[in-house]
Amino acid sequence: MTGSWRWAGADERSIQCCGATPSTFISSNDSGGLFGQFTVPQSDRYDLTIAVKLEIFDDSGRVVASVNARAIRSHTVAADATLNDRERLWFDMTEATMKDLNGQLEKSIPLYLQAYLR
């Protein structure tokens, strides 16, 4: 959730924003077999989804305009990856996902919320 809130705070536009960043950490099975002897098995998988919904409300509380954006990334981690490697992967994955999300919002906001921008 921190990334989407940070995006909202860094944006100079005056818009109400709420975000959610559910993420999961799932173990996966290594393939084994003939190729398992020559490759490093993948021990874990990181899945990241960041979704943001921007809404504009009128005085009566009705939503008069909104924009939705969602970015998804997944990556597997080698069994012999160090903690530092794993943290770097997570950081890079989060950064790339936020760039995707930001690109979507930069296109959608002027298109659907232009009347509310200052």
Image (spheres, rainbow, N blue to C red):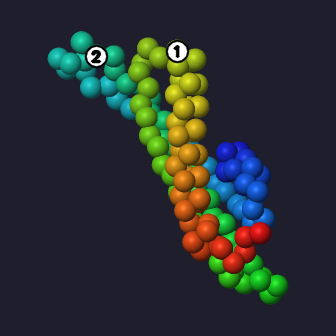
The location of residue 116, given as percent across then percent down, is 72, 75
What is the C-alpha distance between the residues marked 2 and 1?
17 Å
Quarter of the image for the C terminus: give it.
bottom right
| In-front residue for pair 94/116 | 116
Amino acid, disc 1: Thr
Q: Residue furthest front?
A: 118
The location of residue 85, given as percent across then percent down, is 53, 19
| Residue 79 quadrant | top left
Q: Which mark is residue 39?
A: 2
Residue at left 28%, top 16%?
39
Question: Horizontal placement of 90 versus 38: left or right?
Answer: right
Amino acid, disc 2: Thr
Could one spot residue 5 in this view of the protein? no
Question: Horizontal placement of 41 versus 48: left or right?
Answer: left
The location of residue 33, given as percent across then percent down, is 19, 20
Q: Residue furthest left?
A: 34
Q: Which mark is residue 82?
A: 1
Going from N to C along the chain, the mark reached first, 2 or 1, is: 2
Could one spot residue 38 in this view of the protein? yes
Give SS at disc 1: loop
| Residue 40 quadrant | top left
Residue at left 27%, top 26%?
31
